[in-house]
Image: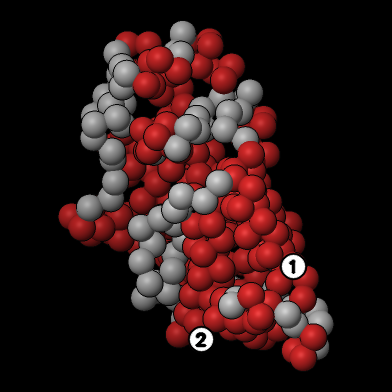
Amino acid sequence: MSVNHYENFPVASILLPKKLRKAVTDIYRFARCADDLADEGDADDAHRLQSLQSYRHALYELSLPQTNRQYRDAGLGDIFDPLARTIAAHQLPLTPFLDLLSAFEQDVTQKRYADFKSLEAYCRKSANPVGRLMLHLYETTDEVSLRQSDTICTALQLINFLQDVAIDWRKKRIYLPQDDMARFGVTETTIATSDHGPVWQALMRFEVERARALLKSGIPLGLRLKGRIGVELRMIIEGGLCILNKIEAVQYDVFYRRPALQSFDWPGIIWRALLKRQK
């Protein structure tokens, strides 16, 4: 399954134990389809919210006997039947799924964020649930691990925002804190005209450094987790750091040259991930 739209989700990676690949795919299918309801197609906002509400009802129905689940009547069986089996098999909490839906609804209703605190609150719903679900699959749910996972996922979401400034602008969204923009003298006209001059570079330099610091603060989790999940997490962190380096390398011009991982980046990412564990 492609991860073109959900880049921070390690979908059925070769590093995942075979017994978990179906579970990750089931979770991803839910997240991908729900995200598409908020983002893709020509539906108006009211219809998007109504569709997301149907997903919310379906999640609540998972606690009911199968004969009482009505989501199949809405054509959602292909998504929620396998998800129900995965949730039951791994005793996954519903809260992360509900948080993801809340984030997708927020994408429909909120297009600007006043400050980093409000953007961070959005990340707690849009990104952090992914990491928490992965830790539940690996039965690693102590508070320290969950907190460090949240930091990594928030950082990855921020990095994705920095990559996608131009894409989000076309969707009439800005995921840069408004107070940061004002502080550095960046306006919406700056983004609309793809002006990547000194003012823009100063803002992006600040945002990149914040994301990098957050990502690095989660490194201890990748070093502490053993086996494949540890390697996977270290690769994810190295991949995020690589994208930040690429943003800097193009002098923060994400309007015409969207930084992204390429096939030739992966040998270095893998090597650094393996090397860190040996230290």
Q: Secondary structure at mark 2?
A: helix
User: What residue appears at the point 29 percent right and 13 percent down from the top-left corner?
Assistant: 197
Distance between the alpha carbons at the discs numbered 2 and 1: 29 Å
Q: Amino acid at mark 1?
A: His
User: What residue appears at the point 44 percent right and 64 percent down from the top-left corner?
Assistant: 10
Q: For residue 278, what is the image quadrant?
A: bottom left
Residue labelled with disc 1: 57
Q: Nearer the viewer, residue 68 or 11?
A: 68
Residue labelled with disc 2: 19
Q: Where residue 218 sits: x, y (%)?
A: 55, 48
* Image quadrant containing the C terminus: bottom left
Specify few, some or many for label 2: CA neighbours under 10 Å numbering under 14, 14-19, or 20 or more: few
User: What residue appears at the point 51 percent right and 68 percent down from the top-left corner?
Assistant: 28
Q: Where residue 191 sits: x, y (%)?
A: 38, 21
Q: Amino acid at mark 2?
A: Lys
For residue 95, above or below residue 162: below
The tag earlier along the polypeptide, 2 or 1, is 2
In this rendering, would 174 be left or right of 75? left
